[in-house]
Image (tube, helix red, strand yellow):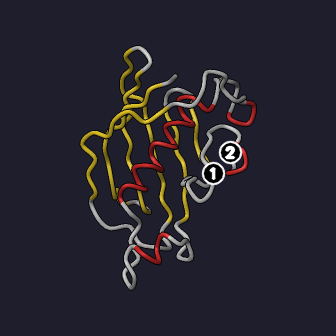
Amino acid sequence: MLTQAQIRELIPHRPPFLWIDSIAELEPGVRCTAVRFLDPADPVFAGHFPGNAIFPGVLIIEAAAQTAGVMLGGLRAGPGPEQAEPAAAGTPLLAAVNRFKFFRPVKAGSVLRIETRKIAAMGAMAYIEAVVWVGDESVAKGELAVVSP
């Protein structure tokens, strides 16, 4: 398991735009599971929407992209996540969002589990399936294209 401090060593995102708290599972280059607690005190909930705090879908996609970034470029394969080292190649960048669907609103106070899995690659482009869960319910699913510099 990687902490947010360890994640900060691997991808350039920083609060208030770092949308993953920890990495629960990691198989570098293959799959990754991240976790995010949606704190009701987070300023995003003050304006989206007052009295009906819903986490924006675009930020769910961003959390999935950050999880994919850790999976693809944040770590080099090692004996385990605890022994992994920062990648030298650079930060993977989001290139496309495809067929993302949202199945229900995600409320403040929820815990997101973001699962990413590489489904294909062509040159520097990797295609990622992302599924986002709250508890045992899938709340969003789609594909991302990520390019590594």
Relative to residue 140, is residue 78 depicted above or below?
above
Residue under label 2: 8
Picture coordinates of residue 144, whole percent (x, y): 36, 37
Give the Cα distance between marks 2 and 1.
Answer: 7 Å
Q: Which residue is mark 1?
A: 14
Dot 1: what SS?
A: loop
Would you identify the image quadrant in which residue 84 lies?
Answer: top right
Mark sitting on residue 115: none
Q: Looking at the image, which residue is at 64% across and 30% down? A: 75
The type of residue carrying mark 2 is Arg
**Residue 145, relative to residue 133: is it above or below?**
above
Q: Is residue 19 above or below residue 81?
A: below
Q: Residues within 10 Å of mark 1 (few under 14, many from 20)?
A: few
**Label 2 SS:** helix
Q: Amino acid at mark 1?
A: Arg
Q: Position of residue 26 (x, y in %)?
A: 58, 37
The local crowd at label 2, few if under 14, some if 14 to 19, many if 20 or more residues have their Cα within 10 Å, is some
Give the mark toward the camera: 2 or 1. 1
Image marks 2 and 1: residues in contact by CB distance under 8 Å: yes
Q: Earlier in the sequence, mark 2 or mark 1?
A: 2
Which residue is pictured at 64% across the width and 23% down the height? 77
- Residue at image coords 70%, 30%: 86
* Quadrant of the image occupied by residue 136: bottom left
Q: Position of residue 146 (x, y in %)?
A: 42, 31
